[in-house]
Structure formats: structure tokens, C-alpha cells
Image: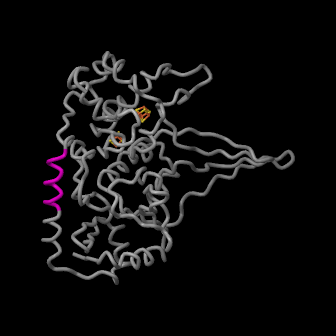
Amino acid sequence: MYKIAKENLSALFQLIADNQELYLPVKTAGQTNFGVWSKDADVDLDTLKTVKSAKDAFFPQSEGLYTVRKDGKKMSIEPESLKEQDFVVFGMKACDVKGVEVLDKVFLSDPVDTFYAARRDHGTIVAFACHEPEETCFCKVFGVDAANPASDVAVWTVGEELYWKALTKKGEALTETVKELFTDDADGEAAVEAEKENIHKIVEKLPYMNLSLEGWNGDALSEKFDSPIWEELYKPCLACGTCTFVCPTCQCYDIKDYTAGSSVSRYRCWDSCMYSDFTMMAHGNNRTSQMQRFRQRFMHKLVYYPANNDGMYSCVGCGRCVEKCPQALNIVKVVKAFQNQGGEK
Ligand code: SF4
Ligand code: SF4
């Protein structure tokens, strides 16, 4: 197994960035999010969860689609180019990698989203095992192993060393370009196995890891949809949309235009099912109350999505909504409320 000392990471970043774009967790104004690496970037690999997931690397918060130009009586349409340059997303965690799998089922199904597909083709994911999962994590509930990210390259942190293992052809190709910085460690497997065991021990002690999803699946539609529990649960919701913007699996977007003199550009940007004008149509909106919008978010993650995707849930237990909702509403609270039939929350 290959390893590299943490003190040599800058050289690794430089070598990767010599050949392709490199996205990794960067601290700006006290907040850590994925950003493009530069020599001056304040790289932060110690923070377990970035505020937003690395979803932007494949599905940016805002991206141009095409521009319509008018020249006299002639009109022309210029599509935005698809991603053509290879890039690396370094430092994702197992839950967020699973989040990409959730997005794949939406954007790579027929009709394929070509913008997303191009990014997936050109992106290589280097993900870290979670050295110390936190209290808000419940990835195991959704079948995610925090110690074994299903990425192109998996990395384990052991003391001042990082152990590196390519898991896919993309991962092997990336490894070839940087392996001059690695040393081969015959004892690496044992060190990594010990690290995995430690991670699993921490995971077993976390408060939400044994959350039961019994009763939640694609067959639970009417029973859950018509439950009076939603009427109580939704009330504190401010409709701020924070939960959807930090979520690695939320995939809704809006399409908007802006004008610049003789041209009109069309772009798409993330939207939130928590907003009152979400999917507004000429006749109005199908969901006319915040209760309906709140219910939609959780029904989609726990019932509609699994019904359409072989039982796979559209939540990966990253816990960001647990941390970030200003009103302490989150998917754990919803699942527990149904377990307790609206009693203790
Ligand atoms: S973050 Fe909380 S308050 Fe804001 S929309 Fe989501 S559930 Fe509602
Ligand atoms: S619903 Fe919450 S816990 Fe689940 S993936 Fe989204 S932000 Fe993470």
C-alpha cells in the first residue's frame, strides 16, 4: 500500500494541479467548503464536514446552459461547452461519495443530463475515511461505511501518514501521475485495518447510528402522506432552504434567464422544495402550504426516491441538516416522530 507524510501534501497538491484542476476543502472566513486549490489556499483537511458537500464539483450551484444572440434579424444559439478538462475532488467523505451515487441515478438516467455526465466523466474522487465520525453522523443507517469510502481512491489517516489505495481505473490513472511522491509500505494494510476498526468502534457509539427506517420505503406512500404528524412537525420550519442547500443529495434546480443587451443567457441554479415559488406554473403551485412543502422534502427522500430507485434512499446520513437547520428540524426528527407516532421528538 502507498503512503505519504502529511508534511508532503503540498507537493502532492502541486503535482496534481500541474495536470488537472484540483478541488479540496478550503477555509475562507472561518467556513470550510470545497474550492479550487492554489498555493495560497488555506487547505483544511481536519474539518470532518464541509458546510456544503462537494456536490458543486459535479452539479454546480449555478451554471450557464446557453446564450441566445440577436444580430439584426438573425438569431443564434450558443450552447455552453461541456466540461472537457479532467479534475480531482480531494478529501470527500464516504457519505458524500454515496451522495454522488444518488445524483447519478437522477442525472445519468434517460434523458441523460449532459452537463452532469461530462463532469462525472472527467472527475476523479479521492475520498478520506472518517478518522473521527461526529455525533450528528448516521451514515450507517443508509448503508454507508465511514471507514471505506467507495471512491476512485480511498485514503486513511494514521498519525502523520496518509495511506492511499486506488479502487478504480480512474484512481489507478491518478496514482500513476503522483506515485513518485509515495513510498510503498508493506505494513500499510495492518495500519489501515487498525484505523478501520477504530472508526467502526466510534460509529457504533454515535447516537443516531441505530435509527430505524422500518416502515419507510417505496410502499409507505399513502400511510405516510396522509399522516396527521406532518401538521405538527412542519410548524417551526422557516422555509429558509438551508437544509436543501447543504444536502449532498438534493438535486432540484430552477432555470432562469438574464438579459445583456442583445443577448439572453439561460442558466440553472439550485432550488429548494421548501420555497413557496418552487415549481410555480402559470396556474399556480401544486403545493400551497408550508406543511405540503415540508412533507414533500422528506417523502421524496424516504418514499418516492426509493420507490423509483430499487429501494435506495435519497439521504446518506451526513447530518448536515441536523447541524444547520436554525429550527432544529431534520430528517432524524422526522423519522423519530413517526416511530413515536408524533409523541416524543
Ligand atoms: S433548514 Fe429547517 S427551517 Fe430551514 S427550510 Fe429546512 S427544515 Fe425549514
Ligand atoms: S437529508 Fe440531511 S442527513 Fe440526509 S443527506 Fe441531506 S443533509 Fe445529509
Q: Residue at x 36, y 40 (%)?
A: 321
Q: Position of residue 84 (x, y in %)?
A: 54, 64
Give ligand 1's quarter of the image: top left
The image shows residue 187 at horizontal and vertical percentages of: 14, 77
The residue shown at (51%, 51%) is 60
Q: Is residue 326 above or below residue 80?
A: above
User: Which quadrant of the figure contains the N terminus?
Assistant: bottom left
Q: Is 272 displayed left or right of 222 in the figure?
A: right
Provide the major secondary structure of the magenta segment: helix
**Membership of 31 in magenta stretch:** no
The percent position of residue 273, horizontal first and vertical second, equals 47, 32
With respect to residue 147, does 269 lie above or below? above
The percent coordinates of residue 192 (x first, y second) are 17, 68
Task: From this view, report whether residue 282 is shown above or below residue 30.
Answer: above
Q: Quadrant of residue 299?
A: top left
Q: How many discs appear?
A: 0
Identity of the residue furthest to the front in this view: 30
Q: Answer left or right for 48 relative to 38.
A: left
**Which portion, as a residue range, is magenta?**
196-206
Corner quadrant of residue 327: top left
Q: Quadrant of residue 307?
A: top left
